[in-house]
Image (cartoon, rainbow, N blue to C red):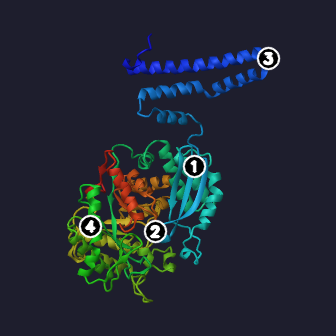
Amino acid sequence: TSTSNPSHRNPAQLQAFSSWLFTVACCRACCRIAHTLERRRVMGDKHLESERVVIETYLQEHGLETTLNDAVNAVVKARPRDPYVQLGKALLKASDGADAVAAVAAREILGSSGRPALEVEIETQRGTFVGVASSGPYDDDADRHGGKGLLKARDAARAALPEVLRGRDVGDQTAVDAILAEALQDGRLPANAVAAASAACCVAGAAHADVAPHAYIAKLAGQSGGAPRLPLPVVRIVDGQQAGAGATGLHVAGISVAPASSSSLEEALDLCAAVHEKVPAACVAKNVPPPAFGRGGGYALVVSGDRAAKALEVVVEACRLAGADDKVALSLECGAHALVAKSDADDDDEKSPAYDVEAFAYGDASFSKSGAEMVEDYAALLAAFPVDTLEDPFAEHDVDAFVQLKERLDAAANGDASAGPPPKKRGPVGGDSTCAVQLVGAACCGDGDAVDAFDERKTLNTLNVTLAKGRTVSGAVALAAHARGRGWGLVVSSDGDDGDAFAAHLAVGLRAGQFRAGGLQGAEHAAKYNALLRLATGGQQVAWAGADFRTA
């Protein structure tokens, strides 16, 4: 058959021709080598004869000729623009150690406001990949980073991670996480090193599989069918409690906006940015001192009197000035566990603790409220403001208060006048007809057992998932599946104030309905929302959670 003009042949003929041409070239090269060796053998060079045998044995042992032929055939069949890239990937996949961890490093890095984070870096034949954890355990050295240093965690990671991870296949996340969890259990590794290492291996595994991290996580979670779904961003507008350099006087941890009526992620973030920009003007309108910048990406307000109500008034006014007052719902991140004295927090009894609503006020004043009084406060705020979400309204063990709040909300929803006015924000939350108010467990709901306990009493209906809470990527996937199996909604949050955007990929991979990454003040927070924007505008078909974020 003539080979003078192969360009006019069909793909099958072209592939066959290429394979034949490659084989001929290899054969000719081998013949030349064999001819030279034969000449030298005749001349008495026994060393080269021995070398010939070694080379042939090596070629057969590793199947190089077959591997090369298969790789070239695959490239010719696909005909990519750059054949050498695909050829390199095909040959790399043939390596038994291609997906193995070759080296591990750990370091303390800086996040927002100079607060440390722990970074774990792993190296494979594909490159280097990092994971970051901003959670503890910490050094407790008051003279360095206010006790939030991570040098002990760094040193433990450097000592143990190479032995734990070197040679492990990054393509088997379940196995990697199992060995990391074992190292956590036996005390060789701290929790932050385990979380960072798990994230690094997940990012590496995605790269080795030639997919984005969110797609890799989706496959782990059994959520890979259909287009990726972008979660509704819940953006912090006001930072409370210990925000920035000092106390704010506001006892709730934060107030956020959720633009569920938006038709796209871009529109949702535009609305959130517009509200954020109007906060200083809203402070003027409500006679509140100019705000400072909070540590969580929102504004730190100095408010007095009924502080939570005053802060909500500012946010509502900012929404009105931004033209978003009928387009967003408000989320109240209560953070009630931070108001409980440590002695009460360590008490396992299910009695109601005292909540010090002056805990973050200036000065040494203290004013405690019971769980029942906190229920009344929340009911009043829900009736007066368009709040549809309460997160961590009580300490985890305050069973009575959780039950009282549920009963109060159920009665108001059923039109019972004795329960007081119903919530101002009416209608099902997130398209879920069973959810009148979204009750989120973050700090108060840390594992599957806690999910089961709250679900049995029907006192929470949504789980805030973080990598730290799951310990590993596999743990976070399992915890999310457990909550979803109870009919709960999912919110994924970023653990820290560093610029790492892994949490955004975790949210998309888990198909969470909502995503929290703080406010828009500071690139470390915006980076996580920007990761979602890149996915939204990257040319891939994506779905949008939008108004049905609990059910879609």
Q: Where is residue 380 in the image (x, y as percent from the top left)?
A: 27, 78
Q: How far apart are marks 4 and 3 (CA)?
A: 86 Å
Mark 4 vs mark 3: which is more N-terminal? 3
Mark 1 vs mark 4: which is more N-terminal? 1
Q: Residue 251 carries which label?
A: none
What's the amino acid at mark 1? Glu
Say few, some or many: other residues with alpha carbon within 10 Å of mark 2 (under 14 / 14 to 19 / 20 or more): some
Dots 3, 1 in contact, CB < 8 A: no
- In percent of the image, x 58 and y 44: which residue is there? 100
What residue sits right under mark 4 in the picture? 274
Say few, some or many: other residues with alpha carbon within 10 Å of mark 1 (under 14 / 14 to 19 / 20 or more): many
Would residue 229 be found to the left or right of residue 155 on screen? left
What residue sits right under mark 1 in the picture? 123
What residue sits right under mark 2 in the picture? 112
**Which callout, 3 or 2, points to the residue nearer the camera?**
3
**Which callout, 4 or 3, points to the residue nearer the camera?**
3
Q: Is residue 71 above or below residue 204?
A: above
